[in-house]
């Protein structure tokens, strides 16, 4: 429920549990939800009763994560079949159901504040949509999110309220941070955050790596996974699955021009920078928050880390060429994030001169979310998934506020 530890660090399990051998032997015959249940159980123990945990899994892992074969060796793991068409839905759904469980006996409503520059906010909002006892205020910068993103943020009702702030994303984040340190608000409202570093978002992300390996037809080949990375949360979840025993030989952290992690891995120097805008904007991160988790998983040993992770970075021109190449070669429409992942996979394979392998490129978002650049590149219209088309037709509801803290505070108090 705390998100951040009291010393400002991120939570990790003290120990990464491992599965018994029998789990791996029976993997091919168990469902995605059963994988989720067995994995979560190892972390959660009896903090949540078995039937309740089953229910949380049933209600959060309720869309597929299929592995699509481009050819015998190259596969795409599609993580965009959730309500907001990006992998963040897995984490957000599970976190929302888990928090719902822990607040159900509280008589005070839990008020969640989320500042968003787009995708995280809509995944969190959809996760908490209709959850009893929890209200969500989403703060987003007016005019600074894409039209599709804005619809995804502003067309939910019930317990989700979109606040359109006249300011920047940093202003939104500042308002949220100020609320958490305001004594008056803290006393009158039961405030919580649901930020992307919450451990309850990482655990469910490990499920789909295990489910991906299950879907590989050929067994025994070396498995390599390329993860389009920004804050490094998704790759951390993959590493956790590996440390539980999942046989993945190498992870590749694919970055765009925001290549702080790629540089760190090659030089050992961590030099956070201001982020720059790219086509794969969910990876525009200049100071990846989960790096400390990755370091911790390797006991802060860079050589150990390099033995399990490689990293390569690609710019926007290369992102476009990757979308084109995947389409021309395989007839598959990949989004800008997936394209960076594809390039990084190819680069790794060429350096290793590998002949026999199973390569999995993680596709983190649906290409329709990036309609403009994708359609211009492949010269073809792409299909809009129905849930996105529905959402775009709906009417926007937002409350417009200026970026002064007093305005925001008065507003929050008026909602009690
Ligand atoms: C958030 C996001 C990423 C980056 O994931 P991290 O866990 O921050 O590394 C990549 N692609 C998409 C579409 C995302 O939404």
Image (cartoon, grey):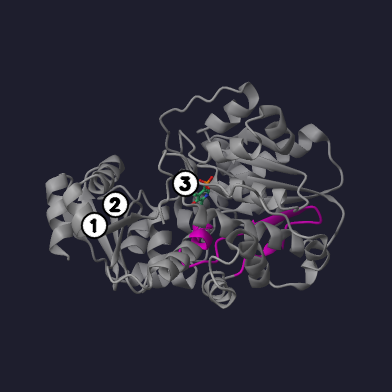
Tell me the CA gap for discs 1 and 2. Answer: 6 Å
Spot occupied by residue 13 in the image (x, y as percentages of width and height): 58, 49
Q: Indicate if the residue with disc 3 has its beta carbon within 8 Å of ligand 1.
A: yes
Tell me if mark 3 has few (under 14), some (14-19) or many (20+) residues whose alpha carbon lies within 10 angstroms of its own. Answer: many
Spot occupied by residue 142 in the image (x, y as percentages of width and height): 25, 50
Which of the 4 image quarters holds residue 259? top right
Spot occupied by residue 114 in the image (x, y as percentages of width and height): 33, 54
Relative side of 219 to 271, left or right? right
Q: Are marks 1 and 2 in contact (CB under 8 Å)?
A: yes
N-terminal-most mark, 1 or 3: 1
Tell me the CA gap for discs 2 and 3. Answer: 15 Å
Screen quadrant of the N terminus: bottom left
Q: Which residue is mark 3?
A: 282
Instruction: Identify the magenta region.
Output: 64-91
Label 1 sits on a secondary structure element that is: strand
Tell me if mark 2 has few (under 14), some (14-19) or many (20+) residues whose alpha carbon lies within 10 angstroms of its own. Answer: many
Magenta stretch holds residue 83: yes
Spot occupied by residue 174 in the image (x, y as percentages of width and height): 26, 42
Instruction: Work out whether 223 lies above or below 85.
Output: above
Q: Nearer the viewer, residue 320 or 272?
A: 272
Magenta stretch holds residue 56: no
N-terminal-most mark, 1 or 2: 2
Tell me the CA gap for discs 1 and 3. Answer: 21 Å
Furthest residue in direction front, as rendered? 46
Q: Looking at the image, can residue 208 be seen? A: yes
Residue sitting at x 49%, y 24%? 271
Q: Which residue is mark 2?
A: 140
Q: Which residue is mark 1?
A: 163
Screen quadrant of the C terminus: bottom left
Q: Looking at the image, can residue 408 be seen? A: no
Label 3 sits on a secondary structure element that is: helix
């Amino acid at each position: 429920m705390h998100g951040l530890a009291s010393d400002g660090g991120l939570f990790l399990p003290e120990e990464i549990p491992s599965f018994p051998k029998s789990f791996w032997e029976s993997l091919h015959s168990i469902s995605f939800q059963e994988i989720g249940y067995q994995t979560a159980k190892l972390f959660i123990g009896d903090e949540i009763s078995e039937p309740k945990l089953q229910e949380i899994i049933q209600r959060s892992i309720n869309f597929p994560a299929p592995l699509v074969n481009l050819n015998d060796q190259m596969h795409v793991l599609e993580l965009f079949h959730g309500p907001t068409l990006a992998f963040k839905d897995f984490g957000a759904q599970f976190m929302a159901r888990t928090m719902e469980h822990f607040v159900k006996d509280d008589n005070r409503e839990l008020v969640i504040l989320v500042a968003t520059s787009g995708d995280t906010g809509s995944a969190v909002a959809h996760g908490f949509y209709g959850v009893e006892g929890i209200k969500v205020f989403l703060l987003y910068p007016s005019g600074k999110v894409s039209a599709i993103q804005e619809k995804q943020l502003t067309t939910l009702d019930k317990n989700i309220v979109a606040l359109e702030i006249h300011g920047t994303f940093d202003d939104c984040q500042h308002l949220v941070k100020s609320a958490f340190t305001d004594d008056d608000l803290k006393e009158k409202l039961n405030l919580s955050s649901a930020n992307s570093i919450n451990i309850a978002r990482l655990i469910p992300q490990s499920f789909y790596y295990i489910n991906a390996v299950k879907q590989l037809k050929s067994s025994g080949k070396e498995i390599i996974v390329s993860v389009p990375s920004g804050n490094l949360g998704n790759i951390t979840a993959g590493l956790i699955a590996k440390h539980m025993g999942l046989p993945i030989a190498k992870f590749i952290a694919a970055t765009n021009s925001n290549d702080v992690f790629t540089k760190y891995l090659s030089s050992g120097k961590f030099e956070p920078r201001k982020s720059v805008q790219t086509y794969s904007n969910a990876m525009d991160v200049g100071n990846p928050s989960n790096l400390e988790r990755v370091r911790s998983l390797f006991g802060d040993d860079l050589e150990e880390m390099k033995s399990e992770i490689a990293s390569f970075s690609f710019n926007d021109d290369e992102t476009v060429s990757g979308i084109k190449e995947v389409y021309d070669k395989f007839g598959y429409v990949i989004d800008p994030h997936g394209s960076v992942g594809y390039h990084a996979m190819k680069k790794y394979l060429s350096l290793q001169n590998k002949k026999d392998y199973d390569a999995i490129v993680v596709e983190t978002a649906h290409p329709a979310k990036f309609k403009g650049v994708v359609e211009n590149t492949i010269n073809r219209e792409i299909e809009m998934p129905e849930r996105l088309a529905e959402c775009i037709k709906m009417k926007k509801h937002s409350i417009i506020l200026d970026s002064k803290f007093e305005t925001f505070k008065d507003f929050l108090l008026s909602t009690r």
